[in-house]
Amino acid sequence: MSTNCTAEQYDADFLPQRLNNWEVARAPGSGARRPQARTGRTQPVVDARGHLMPGVKRRHTAFVLSDEVWQHSSARWPQCTRGAPKNAAFAVGGTATMGYKGIATNYLPSSTVRVLTVTAPGSKERLFQ
């Protein structure tokens, strides 16, 4: 079989001329910079037992959480109103089946959605507030 079929028969299908994926030569002097050595030293913050070394400030969390981030954001999901009857149209809970963040979907029945706030006249999108 190898006398009749060579490995070159597969090379013709993947030639750049056939696939139309040409590469443009890089302009001289525009090559990527070579990696260079870093300066300075790495300072350890914990000892061999995993305890903070003296003089290192302790952070209470690894995440930067600020109240300013949440002050200006609108509500993401519907909230039930306390004291409202359970069958009220505006008392929504976990029954909204609109999809991710209120984005209307075509495959979910709209009869199960109890969120009635429409953002614009004629719009099918609902607004969770």
Image (cartoon, rainbow, N blue to C red):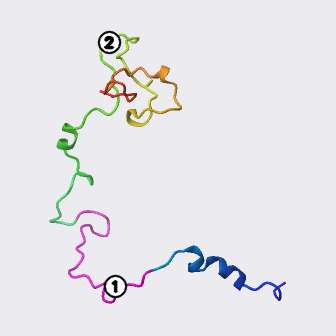
Q: Does the magenta-highlighted stretch encompass residue 30?
A: yes
Q: Amino acid at mark 2?
A: Ala
Choose mark 1 or mark 2, whichever is in front: 1
The magenta region covers 24-52
Between residue 41 and residue 125, name the one nearer to us: 125
Q: Quadrant of residue 19?
A: bottom right
Q: Quadrant of residue 118?
A: top left
Magenta portion: prevailing SS class: loop
What residue is drawn where x is 39% and y is 32%? 102
Measuring from the top left, give residue 99's x and y in whole percent.
Answer: 45, 34
* 48 w.r.t. 1: above or below: above
Secondary element at tag 2:
loop
Q: Please tell me the numbered disc located at residue 31.
A: 1
Disc 2 designates what residue? 84
Q: Earlier along the polypeptide chain: callout 1 or callout 2?
A: 1
The C terminus - image quarter: top left
Q: Amino acid at mark 1?
A: Gly
What residue is drawn where x is 15% and y is 65%? 55
